[in-house]
Image (spheres, rainbow, N blue to C red):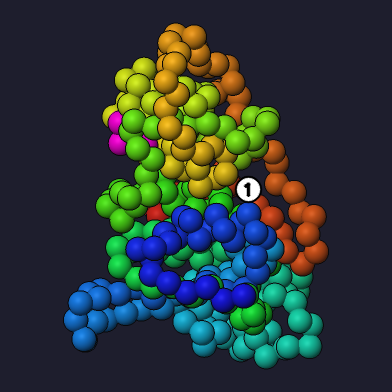
């Protein structure tokens, strides 16, 4: 399957939702345009690889030097040692995992490498103009894979939480006069922020986002954005406000539930692809911002 269009038609958040819910595999190519109205428009390409709805690698080139360049930049391995492992194609194991198995890189180093790849993806959510292509038949480059993976929707949520400029997503946000309604039977298993939990508590289809913002004493825009993230996560949907509006006081917030929400510990169950949780990634991102250029 191949899908290509403008980011004006499909936002990255919506694309990640499609990939996550459909458990898609392949490569998402994003082309950032500096000015679509000029013939000399500058562009830059980015590549994100998925396996069954999980992100496994990202790079800004197709020469197979992205992950290798990060290792060389940090001077973790002697160039000749790194070259030896790069040319060893008999194993078929992802390069990062191959280096860890051989004992030349440790788990913390792989985590930092993968986090730096995900940081590149988070930056893509700032793009105002661009086009994309989702190719399910694209080959996965062994040299760009650390061996770690994370759900696409978790990365999308993290990126949206740090997004400052929402202009490109203005048309996708739920209307302030609309309500949201839960589309899941149980409580969310995803790691949610306190405001997201608070907004989700009102997902009964009878209270407008504007009224929710007033009740929570939060700016309407922040409540809209939190509701959009819940929609992207597949937890709620936007619905017209019911004519018989119920009182907000009938739906008190469960503070204990807000404080107790968390992800489970890291589990490594998928062969040759280690899964890491969202909280761990957030700590890594903070480390990268303060210690790595």
- Which one is in front, 12 or 4? 4
Q: Is residue 25 above or below residue 83?
A: above
The front one of 66 and 82 is 66
Can residue 3 be seen here? The reply is yes
Q: Residue 260, percent across and down? A: 61, 24
Query: Which residue occupies 43% across, 42% down?
Result: 228
Vertical order, 282 against 273 (above or below)? above
Q: Quadrant of the C terminus?
A: bottom left
Residue named by callout 1: 277
Residue closer to the observer: 232 or 87: 232
Q: Nearer the viewer, residue 86 or 216?
A: 216
Query: Could you say which quadrant of the image residue 263 lies in?
Result: top right
Magenta stretch holds residue 1: no
Extreme residue toward the front, this view: 243
Which residue is found at the position 32% from the left and 20% from the top? 214
Q: Residue at x 49, y 53 (%)?
A: 156
**Residue 206 relative to residue 109: left or right:** left
Q: Residue furthest left?
A: 38
Against 181, is 290 above or below?
below
Mark 1 Cα shell of 10 Å, populated few (<14), some (14-19), many (≥20): some
Give the answer, above or below, for where 44 lies relative to 293.
Answer: below
The residue positioned 31% from the left and 56% from the top of the image is: 168
Q: Can residue 77 be seen from the camera position used here?
A: no
Q: Is residue 131 left or right of residue 107?
A: left
Could you say where residue 251 lies in the image, as x and y percent from the top left?
Answer: 50, 13
Residue 57 on image: x %, y %: 58, 69
State the extent of the magenta-drawn residues as a range. 220-224
Residue 4 % position (x, y): 47, 74
Q: Quadrant of the N terminus?
A: bottom right
Element assignment for label 1: loop
Chief secondary structure of the magenta portion: helix
């Amino acid at each position: 399957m191949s899908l290509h269009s403008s980011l004006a038609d499909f936002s990255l958040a919506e694309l990640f939702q499609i990939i996550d819910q459909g458990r898609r595999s392949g490569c998402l190519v994003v082309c950032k345009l500096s000015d679509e109205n000029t013939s000399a428009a500058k562009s830059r390409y980015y590549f994100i690889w998925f396996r069954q709805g999980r992100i496994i690698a990202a790079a800004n080139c197709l020469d197979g030097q992205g992950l290798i360049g990060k290792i060389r930049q940090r001077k973790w391995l002697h160039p000749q040692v790194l070259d030896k492992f790069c040319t060893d194609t008999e194993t078929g194991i992802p390069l990062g995992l191959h280096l860890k198995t051989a004992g030349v890189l440790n788990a913390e180093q792989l985590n930092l490498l993968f986090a730096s790849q995900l940081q590149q993806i988070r930056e893509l959510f700032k793009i105002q103009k661009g086009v994309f292509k989702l190719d399910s038949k694209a080959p996965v480059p062994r040299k760009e894979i650390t061996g770690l993976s994370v759900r696409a929707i978790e990365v999308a949520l993290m990126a949206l939480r740090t997004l400052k400029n929402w202009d490109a997503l203005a048309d996708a946000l739920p209307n302030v006069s609309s309500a949201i309604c839960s589309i899941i039977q149980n409580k969310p298993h995803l790691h949610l922020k306190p405001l997201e939990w608070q907004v989700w508590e009102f997902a009964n289809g009878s209270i407008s986002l504007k009224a929710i913002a007033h009740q929570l004493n939060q700016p309407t825009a922040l409540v809209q954005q939190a509701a959009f993230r819940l929609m992207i996560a597949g937890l709620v949907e936007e619905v017209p406000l019911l004519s018989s509006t119920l009182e907000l006081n009938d739906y008190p917030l469960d503070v204990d539930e807000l404080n107790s929400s968390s992800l489970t510990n890291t589990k490594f169950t998928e062969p040759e692809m280690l899964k890491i949780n969202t909280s761990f990634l957030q700590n890594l991102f903070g480390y990268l911002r303060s210690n790595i250029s």
